[in-house]
């Protein structure tokens, strides 16, 4: 009877896990239908543990970080693609899953860079005379702020909120791994 109860509890736990991963995408109000389809096609949103493994393996894949891209700059695009696929598979990854995580990580890294540049520009205004500072802040808000909001809205349509949070929590490590900081 104990074996039956354990098996039943295990099945229940697996069913709940499967349901949770699907609900994470289905319940994300900003994620577009296309975004949801992509997430489901690659097995659901990635987890923090999976992202940590991705960060550990990323430098081992040629051409996907600043350093490995520089090291491989003499290779042709086709050879590079085969080399990348081979490296991903040799690390035990499903190629689509790895590239999905890479794509969402790079999307978040680009958004982070835009946010940092905006903050730096705003910081430069602090020493300006009041009137000039206000005019520059207004211009920045209208031009860059609008672009930043549009980019964030597009990210929200394509990258599940749970993944955005994971990448933000590991942004420093991602940027260091990528060779961007």
Image (cartoon, rainbow, N blue to C red):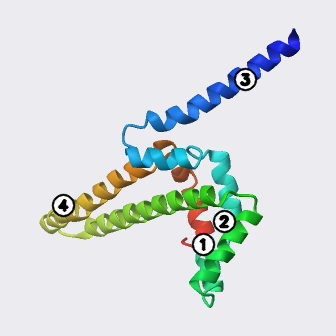
What residue is pinned by disc 2? 58
Out of 17 and 149, give the one closest to the viewer: 17
How far is the residue under mark 3 from the one under mark 4?
Answer: 54 Å
What residue is pinned by disc 3? 11
Observer able to see residue 150:
yes
Question: Comparing marks 1 and 4, which lies closer to the viewer?
Answer: 1
Q: Quadrant of residue 148?
A: bottom left
> Mark 3 or mark 4: which comes first in sequence?
3
Percent x, y of residue 170: 58, 54
Assess disc 2: are there few (<14), some (14-19) or many (≥20) residues with their C-alpha within 10 Å of its C-alpha: many
How far is the residue under mark 4 from the one under mark 2?
Answer: 37 Å
What residue is pinned by disc 4? 142
**In the displayed structure image, the side of residue 175 where residue 154 appears, left or right:** left
Assess disc 3: are there few (<14), some (14-19) or many (≥20) residues with their C-alpha within 10 Å of its C-alpha: few
Out of 29 and 171, give the one closest to the viewer: 29
Assess disc 1: are there few (<14), some (14-19) or many (≥20) residues with their C-alpha within 10 Å of its C-alpha: some
Percent x, y of residue 66: 58, 77
Q: Please determine whether, in this image, residue 75 is positioned above or below residue 145.
A: below
């Amino acid at each position: 009877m104990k074996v039956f109860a354990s098996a039943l509890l295990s099945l229940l736990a697996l069913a709940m896990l499967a349901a949770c991963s699907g609900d994470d995408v289905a319940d994300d109000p900003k994620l577009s239908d296309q975004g949801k389809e992509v997430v489901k096609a690659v097995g659901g949103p990635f987890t923090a543990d999976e992202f940590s493994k991705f960060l550990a393996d990323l430098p081992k894949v040629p051409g996907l970080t600043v350093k490995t891209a520089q090291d491989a700059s003499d290779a042709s695009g086709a050879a590079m693609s085969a080399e990348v696929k081979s490296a991903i598979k040799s690390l035990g990854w499903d190629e689509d899953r790895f590239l999905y995580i890479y794509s969402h990580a790079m999307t978040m890294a680009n958004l982070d860079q835009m946010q940092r540049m905006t903050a730096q520009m705003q910081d430069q205004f602090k020493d300006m005379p009041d009137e000039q500072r206000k005019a520059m802040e207004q211009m920045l808000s209208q031009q860059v702020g609008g672009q930043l909001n549009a980019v964030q809205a597009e990210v929200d349509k394509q990258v599940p909120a749970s993944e955005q949070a994971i990448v933000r929590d590991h942004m420093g490590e991602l940027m260091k791994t990528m060779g961007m900081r």
